[in-house]
Image (spheres, helix red, strand yellow):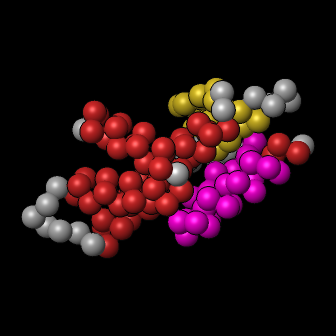
Amino acid sequence: MPLIKEIQEKLLFYAKKINAPKSLIPLINETNDLAYPYIEIDDSGLLYFVIRERGVEYERRLVAREEDLFYLIFSKITFSMASQFELENRIESQDSRKLIFEKQIELLKTLDEEWAKRENWYNRNNV
């Protein structure tokens, strides 16, 4: 399926831009069943962002645009990377979320300014 190859190439392109660990790149049409997101593309080309763990589906989002799918994926990837960065650079006197959010926004800006703006808005309104 050409769409699968296109999505895979874009995932790898974006991941390379931020040096994302290969382990964080989601699979396509295959779950690891460990509560890490994967992409599902059905026979009609509809895109889903899915999270499953131990056979239980916790989240399934139909995504209208590829752009939104990549935002969801890289929001998760950059959060994981930013959390690891915070662990390695912890400032004991500071709320750990501050460094995580700053690093996540920095990583997202590297990928797409609009993604960074979306995430920044979400963080400011949900913390």
Q: Quadrant of the N terminus?
A: top right
Picture residue at 9% right of the left edge, 64% below the top: 93
Could you tell whether 82 is left or right of 35 in the image? left
Outermost residue to the front:
113
Residue 11 sits inside the magenta stretch: yes
Residue 103 pos. (x, y %): 35, 60
Rendering quarter of residue 56: top right
Q: Is residue 16 visible?
A: yes
Q: Observer-nearest residue: 32 or 5?
A: 5
Q: Observer-nearest residue: 17 or 95?
A: 17
Could you tell whether 117 is left or right of 65 in the image? left
Rendering quarter of residue 127: top left
Picture residue at 54% right of the left edge, 41% below the top: 72
From this view, report whether residue 7 is shown above or below residue 124: below
From this view, report whether residue 83 is shown above or below residue 43: below
Residue 87 sits inside the magenta stretch: no
Outermost residue to the right:
1
From this view, report whether residue 96 is shown above or below residue 71: below
Residue 121 pos. (x, y %): 34, 38
Q: Observer-nearest residue: 96 or 106?
A: 106
Residue 114 pos. (x, y %): 48, 44
Q: Which residues are magenta?
A: 5-29
Picture residue at 55% right of the left edge, 30% below the top: 59
Picture residue at 29% right of the left edge, 34% below the top: 126
Q: Is residue 54 visible?
A: no
Could you tell whether 80 is left or right of 72 in the image? left
Main secondary structure of the magenta stretch: helix
